[in-house]
Image (spheres, helix red, strand yellow):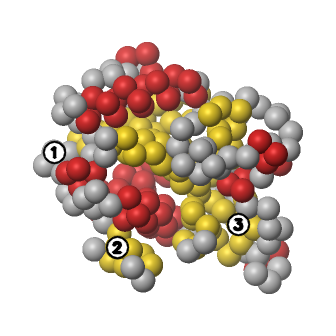
Amino acid sequence: MISARDDVMVGLDRASSPVEWRISEGLVAYETALALMEARAAAIADGVADELIWLLEHPPLYTAGTSAKRAEVIEARFPVHSAGRGGQLTYHGPGQRVVYVMLDLKRRGPDVRRFVATLEEWIIRTLANFDVAGERRADRIGVWVRRPDKGAGREDKIAAIGVRIKRWVTLHGVALNIDCDLSHYAGIVPCGVSDPRYGITSLADLGRALTQTEIDKALRREFERLFGPVARVQAAADILVASFPAT
């Protein structure tokens, strides 16, 4: 374990079995993903399914967490979905790697703050593979990069984090901007942060031309170091959402 902040450690207890690792190609409808995630989390809580990490992309849409304010929808360019997770408004779309994290905190340690700090650390370590210095902020959830090229004190968010805990199983997770259309964020106040010093960025915006495959390999490598081994990485022919089992 290492300290993420003065009083929060990162790294979870290891589970007795590997975590299943799934990658979906194409764009997955948000309603489909939410239903599958809820069903799988319930099965994990019942002890009849393995923990799961699910990597995917959504079509352009906004999601509203439990703290979202309607006034922060500036222009509903895309559908706005109630997510049931913590946090406020965010955007999902092509060129963004969404990772849904379904882990059993009863087995790994029932500490939500440590879990969130470990998610942040996971993204920070992944970004370090590509010489991007991601940082956490005590007053702002997510992963941030400094932008001195934009001016003193400027920072941009590169990854959003929003979670829900149900029966000590985690739902939702992280969204890392690889090469998404950043103009789509203009329709909302992202994560409730309206201070003009703080914006949104992506790896492409930072000059890193990377494929999703490269990102996914780094995510898997750093996940295993913090959470433990994964059971498998699916091949492209084995990632149809229609075949995704609830249990």
Residue 129 visible in the displayed image? no
Q: Amino acid at mark 2?
A: Met
For this view, does 218 lie left or right of residue 246?
right
Label 3: how many Cα within 10 Å (few below 14, some 14–19, many 20+): some
Q: Circle 1 is placed at which residue position?
A: 17
Q: Circle 2 is placed at which residue position?
A: 9
Q: Position of residue 118 (x, y in %)?
A: 39, 63
For this view, does 130 lie left or right of residue 116?
right
Q: Circle 3 is placed at which residue position?
A: 156
The picture quadrant where one finds residue 198 is bottom right
The picture quadrant where one finds residue 240 is top left
Q: Quadrant of the N terminus?
A: bottom left
Report the mark closest to the observer, 1 or 2. 2
Q: Position of residue 152 (x, y in %)?
A: 80, 83
Residue at position x 54%, y 38% in the image? 84
| Up-down relation of residue 167 to residue 155 (above or below) | above
Q: Position of residue 20 (x, y in %)?
A: 28, 38
Give the mark nearer the N terminus: 1 vs 3. Answer: 1
Give the mark nearer the N terminus: 1 vs 2. Answer: 2
Residue at position x 82%, y 34% in the image? 77
